[in-house]
Amino acid sequence: MKEKKTIQGKSLLFNIVFVVLNLAGLTFTVLGFHDNFEDKSTLFRVLGVLMLLLSIAGLVIFRGKLLMSSVARVLVGGLFIVSGLVKANDPIGFSYKLEEYFEDGALAFRIKEWFSAPEFSMEFFMDYALILSVLICIAEIILGVLTIIGGKIKFVSYAMLIMMVFFTFLTWHTANCDSTQKFVDRDTYSMLDPIAEMKISEAKVSTEVTVISRTANLLVVEEMKMPQCVADCGCFGDAMKGSVGRSLTPKESLWKDIVLVYLVLWIFVAQFIIKRNTRKENMVFIATSMLVILFFSWVFGWYFPVFFGLASIFGALWILSIGGNYLGNYYGSALFVSVLCGTLVWYVLSYIPLKDYRPYAVGSKLIEKMNDGVDGVYESLLVYKNTKTGKTREYSGTSTEYTESKIWEDKEWVYDTMVQKVIIPTKIPSITDQFNPFIGIDEVEEYEMKLDSVTIKMEDPSITEISIRDYIINTEKIVLLSSKSLDEADWRNLLRIKAIQKACEEKGVPFVMICSASRERINAFRKKNNFTAPIFINDETELKAISRSNPTVLVIEKGVVTEKYSFRSTPKKEEFITKHLN
């Protein structure tokens, strides 16, 4: 008679000990590869691997696979829900990160390099980045919910494993990208494109540019290029950067995914013995997974994931119980979660993220965000190599240890190289100099743009541009209209915006607009819409950070963002006056 698999295995006590030992071993192994524990790396690695091997052996002997997979389901399920939700909160921001990976010199260069396929490109995915962003977010949340309630575990385990292997490859690429390494890229240009003639000229004087073929219409060129390394994988969107103060480093992101792959493997291996949750099991899984979600909610300073997690899990179970023949199954549960996620995504795409982690969020003190960077501290170390054993030693050139060692006199040791050790890593400010709305002096004169109290020293010939960066953060109150693209913006509420501008003029409150466009395009927009507000130019990257909505109205008082309105929520003139101008 076939033995029934139980959560207790041969001994519940021993299996609990082995599960704890396994997770502890996993933790020590990860810490052993972290830069902060470099001095104890060998100890942690050896200790971690031994604990992992011992605990895995114990779980196999005492048949604790079901218990370990249950713990993995709680951890992975909760993390998938949180990870999917913070990206679903800002799908446009996640799509920007995907676009970075789809650029020709980013992820594609690995394929070009490994398979000698210089013509390979992923740039066609850029047009679908937002769709992919939404699908990935929803898929993560659905898989997280099904993992917790025990639905379609075989399919879910395969799907999660495939997803995690792909994400691990992505973070491996990010962690190991060398911006100085060159790869062969092949591009096709129309002969009508000015770049074609430029490439032909470069090929005559450079060995890194080669003309492969040339016809009356097309030019095919192979060129040595530098890869575009992505510094931040975007695993948790802007949530970690906005709450903790920094994102995971590429190496930390890689190890995070390795840990998830390991946990998913336990679910994958146990998929044949995992059965549909009983009512009691559902309560246990929900309670423990909520602790995981609560922990990450605390880290991110946003407790909506707890509410959303409960709503999605209990909603999935509710559909399962009342869905009848068509929806009373896990497909119905997945459909419910999809509708719930779709509603959230529709809202944040229509308006703005529920939780804004970017430096221009409501309540942000812009001056503080401009000055929260940290100058890095680095130490140059001399590396000596033993000619017999190959071992290396590092010394600070100014240290007493180096001068007393007189290692340069030892014939067994030779100078190898110099490395730079990070003592305190550099942290760039949350708001960089990319936020610098400007206008040319000649444009001020030509278009007679009203600048209110902005002082312009027109008599100084050295001044060619006017920046209102300092003016924005220091003025008593200013209303700022931001548009990352004039052509792609939704101007259905332009009449309301113009009414707000008029009200600001009447109340003596500056109203300015910043956008990323040529002066010709700006003037055409002003003329077409009879728009009289001064318009300044700013880098598009920073405009994307200011707001996901296009356009957006911001109210800034003494350098603090006090309100932000998406294009759909632009208030009427009277409402705006009552709230901000009285």
Image (cartoon, rainbow, N blue to C red):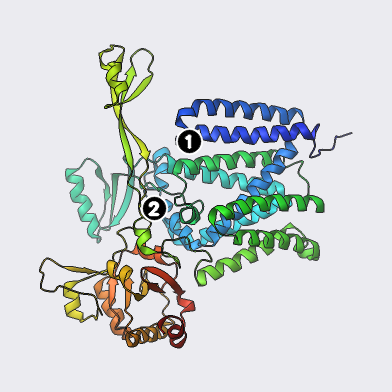
- Eyeballing the image, is 531 above or below 283? below
Q: Residue at x 55, y 25 (%)?
A: 46
Q: Farthest residue in the right direction?
A: 1
Answer yes or no: is residue 29 visible: yes
Residue 335: tell me if it is visible: no
Q: CA distance from mark 2 to mark 1?
A: 30 Å
Q: Which residue is mark 2?
A: 103
Tell me which corner region of the image, top left, top right, bottom left or bottom right, holds residue 301.
bottom right
Q: Secondary structure at mark 1?
A: loop
Viewer-nearest residue: 329 or 388: 388
Q: Residue at x 68, y 47 (%)?
A: 74
**Callout 2 secondary element:** loop
Between disc 2 and disc 1, whose residue precedes?
1
Q: Relative to the observer, which residue lies in front, 226 or 178?
A: 178
Residue 167 placement (x, y as % from top left): 52, 46
Disc 2 packing (10 Å; few <14; some 14–19; many ≥20): some
| Quadrant for the C terminus in the image | bottom left
Confirm or deny contact between disc 2 and disc 1 (CB under 8 A).
Answer: no
Q: Residue 416: percent from the left, percent from the top?
A: 29, 23
For residue 34, the mark is 1
Which amino acid type is marked by label 1? His
Q: Amino acid at mark 2?
A: Glu
**Residue sitting at x 37%, y 17%:** 390
Q: Which mark is residue 321?
A: none
